[in-house]
Amino acid sequence: MDHIVIEEQEVSMTVDDHEILASDSEIDSSCSSSEQFGFLAQKGTIKVEEGNSEHEIIKKSFLMGLGSFGKDTNVVAIHRNSYSSLTGRARLETFRIFSDAVARKCGGNANIKHAWYGASRDEICEIVSHGFSRRRPPANSELYGLGVYLSPANFSIDGALSAVVDENGLRHMLLCRVILGNMEVVCAGSEQFQPSSTEFDSGVDNLSAPRRYIIWSAYMNSHIFPNYIISFRAPCSTGFQRIQAPRVKPSSPYMKLPTLISILSGFLPSSKMVLIAKYHSDFRENKITRFQLIQKLRQLAGDELLVSVIKSYRNKKHEARNRSSAAANPNTTRGGM
């Protein structure tokens, strides 16, 4: 269904993970770990040698996702999770089982994506060895529910902001496969910690152009599988922390709550509008969270009406924008005459 977005959110989409998916099938088992990354070799990883397609595809995706900062960032090494240990093979099999289960639930498509996760070297080693054990929002980020946050394949810059410099001046990130299934929008400031209903499997900040995938804690070791560790050197240890992801104006209109409530008043009885006004007031006074407010709206108005109102609003905004563009460019409508 369409989801209510009560704040303008950044959207952008430039790179997908099709190429990374292709690289998963081109694994060269002859790669060996260097002494510089002995700590990774101990975790059962294998170095992906420079020059082969697997290395180049992952490196290209990572640097492109950094935007203009990619040209000054040096990828020092890429290591692949070999799944060689007993527990490693068990985690891989667990991921496959849940992939199949979510696919059956979602009509045949588990919606598996690649995503980045930045952290300290010690935390990344802990994840590769034992799985995820903590949840935290990324650096310089608002809270979008309580879970594990990952960045889409085309936004490695967001994960890089959470990567911590080690004693060798290197940062490390995980490139993971993630089972997203049916995603639901989680608003900034939400304290949601699980799917809002059995319909959903994961959270996202924006359905059409996500910048955050949220995997709930209950699923963090069944729906996330770390595939690669990327070790890189950023332009400088302090300047990189000031990098902010590029802001791009949303391509579709968002809907403010007062506007939505005003339109709903033409469809709902006064008894329900009184309750909606009360919950809106509670939200403005920080008595309830945004997630709780949206849930109340869904309960009182119903998803069918909300979808209809949102679609109608968006269509009218598009029509108004098209009329405005036509008026501003009269030559276009006259065939250039």
Image: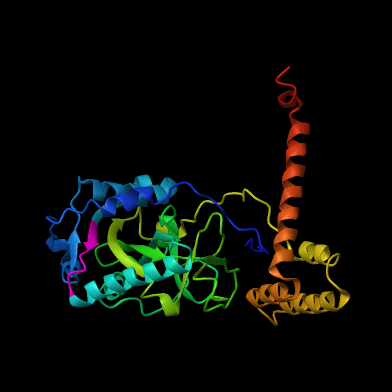
Residue in front for this viewpoint, 257 or 101: 101
Residue 83 colored magenta?
Answer: yes
Query: Dividing the picture into quarters, in which one does residue 208 lie?
Result: bottom right
Quarter of the picture holding the N terminus: bottom right
Let me know if residue 306 appears in the view: yes
Residue in front for this viewpoint, 92 or 288: 92
Which residue appears at 83% of the width and 66% of the height? 267
With 217 as the anchor, is 193 left or right in this view?
A: right
Let me know if residue 170 appears in the view: no
* Residue occupying the far top of the picture: 337
With respect to residue 139, does 66 lie above or below? above
Query: Dividing the picture into quarters, in which one does residue 221 lie?
Result: bottom left
Q: Residue 62 at what x, y percent from top left?
A: 36, 52
Which residue appears at 20% of the width and 46% of the height? 52
With respect to residue 238, does 273 lie above or below? below
Query: Dividing the picture into quarters, in which one does residue 122 lie?
Result: bottom left
Tell me the magenta residue range: 78-85
